[in-house]
Image (cartoon, rainbow, N blue to C red):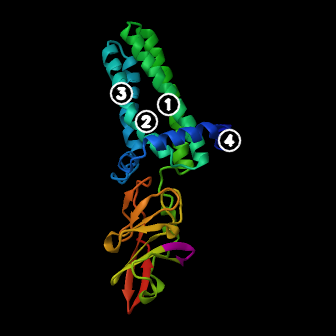
Amino acid sequence: MLRQTISRLEKTTALDAISNRLQSAVQKVAQPRALRDLLHGTWFGHPLHPVLVQLPVGSFMSAAVLDALPGQRKAATTLIAVGTASSAPAIAAGLVDWSSLSKDQRRVGLVHAAANTVALGLYVWSLSARNSGRWGTGRLLAYAGLSVAGAGAYLGGHLSYQQGAGMNVAVPQLFELPDDWAEVGEVASLPEGRPTVRTIEGVRVLLYRHGDDVTAMLEQCGHQGGPLGEGEVEGSGADACVVCPWHGSTFRLVDGVALHGPASTDQPTLRTRIQDGVLSVAAP
């Protein structure tokens, strides 16, 4: 029944009006590219949101343990205050990641965010009750907040592991490539300084020739699967980058490093070998 409910949630188009307005607002506020890259975790090589949630979640769970022990009111209250304050950067990173997802992912993400907002409100209410001396009420509100946050965490897990949000969706294609070298063709047939696409065992590979070297990466963007072969190229030579036409993720062609988000992980690259002017590639 739970799985059926989540499946229906993914298809609930009634959420789209709110989702679209919130997406526009988030993208407007986070318009500076440096800010988006910071919150996506592009500089970190890993989505930043899962890292930032550790402090508030850890604080709230620790407070729940202390609330069950005698003489720990002050410590529990301090932890709830820390968790509440540290939620702000986690929320900011989560919203920026959410704004670049597909519609069905955003629907689940919207309810995930709503649950966490309710949980945070309960914790703020708990702090207010504790500061006014109503310790019993404060403790009950904190446990209620933890329960709602748990529901939000379940949705977050579904969003990541079932729907693939925040994951490098290109990586599974690496397992479809042959372990041994696969011949692509003559290097001379590849354009200089301009990426081109070849298909190997059903996997589209983006090739980039720069001088005597050729680099290869998976053509499917790791962020949401966009066709990098249709993207624009910025820069030249070793500094040339390909920009995903779907969401603007920017990868350096010589090594697949993600320079700009929303991608927070590098684009998977392949091994290349040139023998007698013939290019071959293989899985990493």
From the image, tell me which residue sits under label 1: 116
Which circle's residue, 3 or 4, is located before the other in the chain? 4
Circles 1 and 2, Cβ within 8 Å, touching? The answer is yes
Question: Which element carries disc 4, helix, strand or loop?
Answer: helix
Residue 86 percent coordinates (x, y): 35, 31
Q: Which quadrant would the N terminus be assigned to in this image? A: top right
Point out residue 39 in the picture as x, y percentages from the top left corner: 38, 45
Label 2 neighbourhood size at 10 Å, few (<14), some (14-19), many (20+)?
Answer: some
Task: Identify the amino acid type marked 4.
Answer: Thr
Whether residue 214 is situated above or below residue 119 in the rendered picture:
below
The residue wearing badge 4 is 13
Callout 4 touching callout 1 (CB < 8 Å): no
- Magenta-colored stretch includes residue 203: yes
Q: Is residue 146 visible?
A: no
Nearer the camera: disc 1 or disc 2: 2
Task: Determine the residue positioned at 41% across, 61% down.
Answer: 250
Range of magenta residues: 199-205
The residue at which mark 2 appears reads as 91
Q: Is residue 227 magenta?
A: no
In the foreground, 71 or 154? 154
Q: Earlier in the sequence, mark 4 or mark 1?
A: 4
The answer for how far apart the CA atoms under marks 4 and 2 are is 24 Å
